[in-house]
Amino acid sequence: MTARPIAFFTIDHGTATTAAAIIGQLDGRFRLLAAGAQPAGISADGLLAGLVAEVAAIEPDVLPDPTTWSDWRRLESATHRPPRALVAAASETGLGAAEAAVAAAGWRVVGRISPERTDALAATERCLDPDVELLVVATADPVPAEERDALADLVALVAAALGRRDDEPTLVLAGGAAGVMQRFPAARVVLGPAPLPHPHAGADPLRDLLVALDQALIAGAGGPAAGFPDGRRALVTATASLAAVLDRRVELVDVGATAGLRVLVGPGGVRGAIVSAEGALTPPDVIEDDRRADGVLQWSTIRADAASMRDRVRNLAIAPWRDAAGDGARLRLAAARAALARLDAAWRLPDDAEDRPASYGTDLLVASGGAFAVAPAPAVALALVDTLRRPGGMTLAHDHARVLAPIGGLADEADRRRLLADLLGDVLAPLGSAIVAAGLHAGRHRGTVRITSEDGADMRIELVPGGVQLVDLPPGVAATAELTTRDGLWLGVRAHHFALPVAGGLGGLVVDTREIPLRLPERPERRRDLLDAWQRPLWAGADT
Amino acid sequence: MPVSAGADAGARVVGAVGPVVEPRVRLRLGAGDVPLVAIGQRVAAGDPVAERRRDGAVAWARLGGSAAPEPGTAVEAGVPVAGRGRRAVRFAGSGRVLYTTPSGLLRVAVGRHAEQVGTPTAGVVESVGPAAIVIRADGIGLPGTLTAGEATVGRLVVAVRRPDDELPVAAVDVGAAGAILVAGARIDVEALTRARAMGVRGVIVGGVVGRDLRSFAASEARQRAALHTSPPFALLVLDGFGKRPIPPGAWAALVAAEGRDVGISADPSFALLDVAAAVAAEPRDRVRVAAGEGLGRIGRLLEVVGRRRLPAGVLGPVARVALEAGGPGQPPEERLVPLADLERTGP
């Protein structure tokens, strides 16, 4: 008698789209059988039934009785819209440090109060705003002498305003501001450590506290996402599990409709992790602010007047799942590039042990989130290389079925590792590899890259200074890339000869000798032409 | 449960955002504004619910040992707010107490001019807070994407023949004074400005060009800053940016409500209709094209046909749709449409 097959669903409930997959067991190994996505707000049942029907039509034996699909187990995670926070400090310096902690903890900063920038009327109105769910008053600890008077005045204003509110927004008093807690009802106050003077994505007690408050708020809220593990936190966990399974440094970037995530895990654990509303596909205030829309459009290759393009960006913010083909797909990836660039701007790692400068390098970079859902793999690979720039080589992959978050939501590390070990080849679509090398000089002896693959292929390509070259290296092929130059190259260290292991993928091998960071022409037409020249070969049917 | 996804293809398509029954409408208050209503009070559309202090500023005075008034205490021009006799603390403007500093400075939000804020809908006052009044509206709210301007109320006039028409500037005349105009798929800034000048109270459209919205917002800001302000005016955008036909469900409800008083709220964005104008149910397979080629066309969803290669080489699920005639040059036809670009006309 043969055992009945096992199958279960993973479902990632995003704020704009829901992604689902069927995981089944074949020959004792878990495999991804089918995956799909649909706009959020539709019951997932139609999508699940469709996936079951797809598999049942092709390979019915791998599934349990298909008519019982509604009883199959589901691993689910959900993301939510970032809650709103107001940040107050007794000086602009203190405000910047506090805002960095609040923003990196997944809150959307909707107001800033400091004596230099805010008058009493505007500050009171911000404190009274019923949409503000968290207020953070922060100073260094102890309070600097020059900030004491300003802090006393600020606390009097905040206490007066909050005393008028019937609802109960949480108030965090961080650092030296904790000394004024007697001015507020105890039930409303949470005491926290001072913000880091030089904010970074590494360990930060204030950010950890703010993350805990965010999670508590989600847990207390109702709605369709209630009760499921938070998708972004689950992605951090899944990245750590993935790094352990691979025994490699793994970085993951997730760009969703309302927030973005970036996490880097090294041998010693999580090196840095931020969740940022600024990392969303479209900036939070893009509807009101033309400049935010222009920030997206500086990555666009579409030729159209600025006003109508800004409107397309706003429509993307309103309904991110729509207009997924043609120019809409290109615009979505331009928005993803802009989001990655914003995430990169907030990405600072603490120094390594013994005060050595932080290492930003990674062996594997994984892209996740709805922003990358419909773009061709080579285009996604270039978007990552364009925006998250650092010298060195890395493998690129795509969490195309959005399975990592539901797996990260599993409570048991052994379960996560077992599933990931089985599913690696299925859930991480190989985008390819990238070598980003700086410092290549133009001239007669520019250098070469020689690629020798395990299947016997041997290619030699001349390096192009300031350019990006795509080398065909199919998925599943491992190779060695040897870069040789007479004047030397910078890949984290400077040398004349490098040999790097690279893996093939849908996007092949990207060899990038452009500047770090990437500098684009100021003039829109020239910038667009240059971006188009880089991107056009990567879009199949680019003229359709 | 059945395995086939084709049994209810409409279940794979996102539904239109349906009307909200008895929606909560929030009217924002500034720190110096004074509510004129109490919780539980019934209000009629247009009734004043708050007094707004315009040109707000912070005034201050030393308390000089007098007891500090509570934050939020109303301040009347010339009336002592603290102390007595020669030590009485008064302000030249009216407003509200903000707070008292540790050094004994009383800070007050005052405005030089007062104006009344009306409710855009009949209903019951549900809460009165320092920053907002919440009213549970009678009837239904048709959700919009955004509102520019202030909450308003007026007689509804459907000024275009079809939901994808545009309202020409010349069609806005003084006869529309006091009305809320349904202006079709788009309105430009000239028509908006003219509508404002003719005494129109509001405009409801499917889409708006962002540039026109900015110009309108700047014009509104100038209006509000003027010494003698005009009645409130609002632009309600139902679907998005650019030229976007009014969604069929909303169009049917607005046509049914023509001639009645209708409100526009800004927080959240609603067209507020009385119950008599409730929307009829739509079949589940009736869809509209909400993005891409054929935007605004209506049709019947025949089946979800699976993944296909789409322009730019991307793969996505598509559906076969029998599109109705969509006006000149758009005969009825059957077409494959990306599933993501479709929206059911009903919720």
Image (spheres, rainbow, N blue to C red):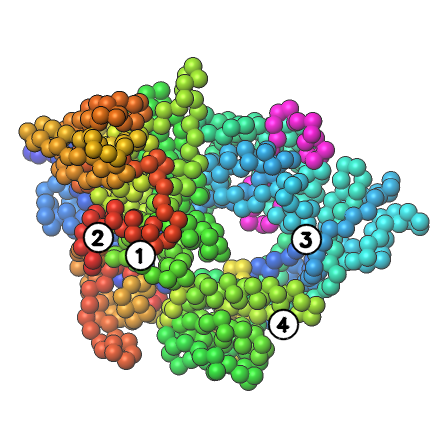
* Quarter where residue A420 is shown: top left
Type of the residue with mark 1: Ile
Pointer 2 or 4: first along the chain = 4
C-alpha separation, residue under disc 3 versus residue under disc 1? 45 Å
Which segment did they paint magenta? A127-152
Q: Position of residue A190 (x, y in %)?
A: 58, 32
Question: Which numbered disc covers residue B314?
Answer: 2
Relative vertical location of residue B85 with respect to residue A469 in this rendering, above or below? below
> Is mark 3 in CB contact (under 8 Å) with mark 1?
no
The chain letter under disc 3 is B
Which residue bears the numbered disc 3? B31
The answer to whether tags 3 and 1 share a subunit is no
Report the mark closest to the observer, 3 or 1: 1
> Circle 3: is it few (<14), some (14-19), or many (20+) Cα within 10 Å?
many
Left or right: residue B42 versus residue A53 is: right
Tell me: A246 left or right of B79.
left
Q: State the quadrant of the C terminus of chain A.
A: bottom left
Q: Which residue is mark 4?
A: B231
Chain letter of disc 2? Answer: B
Please say whether residue A138 is one of the residues in the magenta stretch. yes
Q: Residues within 10 Å of mark 4 (few under 14, many from 20)?
A: some
Q: Give SS at disc 4.
A: loop
| Labelled pair 1, 4 in contact (Cβ < 8 Å) | no
Residue A295 location (% of width, % of height): 41, 49
